[in-house]
Image: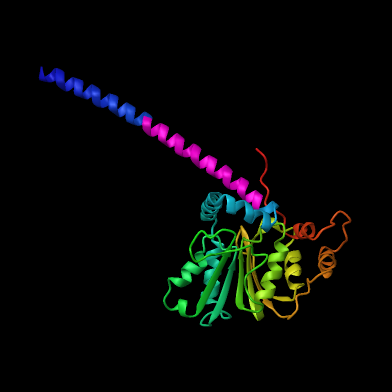
Amino acid sequence: MFGKVKGNRSGNQQSISKKNKKELKAQRKWEQDEERIKGSKFRLLNEYMYTVNSEEAQKHFKKNPEEFKIYHTGYAQQIEKWPESPVGNIIKLLTESEQFSNKKLVVCDLGCGQGEIQEHFQNDKRLSKLITVKSFDLVAIKPYIIETDISNLPLDDCSCDVAIFSLSLMGINYLDYLGEAFRVLKKNGHLIIAEVKSRMNTIDNFVNLVTGMGMKILKRDEHNSHFVLFVFEKVMDVCQFNGPLNQKRVYQILGQKDPNLKDWQSLGQQILQPCVYKKR
């Protein structure tokens, strides 16, 4: 009798084990499908942000703030696969480079995402006394982030020492972001840019674009496989991209006048191309 009962228990355990395996397999498949859906959503949002202007993007994400979080979650997962983090390199630059270390600085992180740079310096007792970071983005994911369109910053002229774009020159009006960075930087202030290599038709054209505004190139680090890190210094008081000089200056940088490029945003896209995914 006891042997028979024991056999039933063993059969029940095997049945439960098979059921658990099926459930685990179904759970894994569901998780994999969910990751694929999230990945597809991230790619759509990423492409959207590269192909609209910042005003339109801000309106969209104010109505759909959960999509902004999905985008930045996907962005963080993508950067984890890179050999180095642009934000990590910028933090290292601010803490170890001769022109920044042990100096009192007001730093503006433009298109800050999850505000990692501000978080880093706020959490360091010594550095927080030296470096004040102000973070700006379309949607405030964290309480300390200032919600704004970075083509129109709520900052006075010549009010910051360092302006940062870490993979954030995304809107088709990114030239307006650069103009705002120039405006808010002090004379001899620094502009730090990390940008995806694949977006640039040539790196020289991008450097010429920024130096043509009244900047001087101090650093051009191309060692990373995915992005280039630049440091510029503001050397002129008046931005050379004001008003009607805009298109003329970019035509000079491109080396020719293309009759099909009739507006300022199209000109900008010839120097920094939007990230657009291949249709599958």
Q: Does residue 52 lie above or below 86 as drawn?
A: above
Res. 194 image quadrant: bottom right
Q: Is the magenta stretch mostly helix, strand or loop?
A: helix
In magenta stretch: residue 31 = yes
Identify the residue at image location x=33%, y=27%: 19
Instruction: Please provide percent x and percent y for residue 26.
Output: 42, 32
Q: In what quadrant of the picture does the N terminus appear? A: top left
Left or right for 248, reference 103: right
Res. 108 image quadrant: bottom right
Identify the residue at image location x=88%, y=60%: 257
Q: Residue reaching furthest left? A: 1
Res. 224 image quadrant: bottom right
Left or right for 166, reference 80: right
Q: In what quadrant of the picture does the C terminus appear? A: top right
Q: Nearer the viewer, residue 264 or 193?
A: 264
What number of labels is visible?
0
Left or right for 174, reference 252: left
Q: How is the image coloured?
A: rainbow
In magenta stretch: residue 80 = no
Instruction: Please provide percent x and percent y for residue 278.
Output: 67, 43
Q: Nearer the viewer, residue 144 or 132?
A: 144
Instruction: Please provide percent x and percent y for residue 149.
Output: 64, 62
| Region in magenta | 23-49
Q: Does residue 21 lie above or below 246 as drawn?
A: above
Q: Nearer the viewer, residue 158 or 222?
A: 158
Instruction: Please provide percent x and percent y for residue 103.
Output: 53, 83
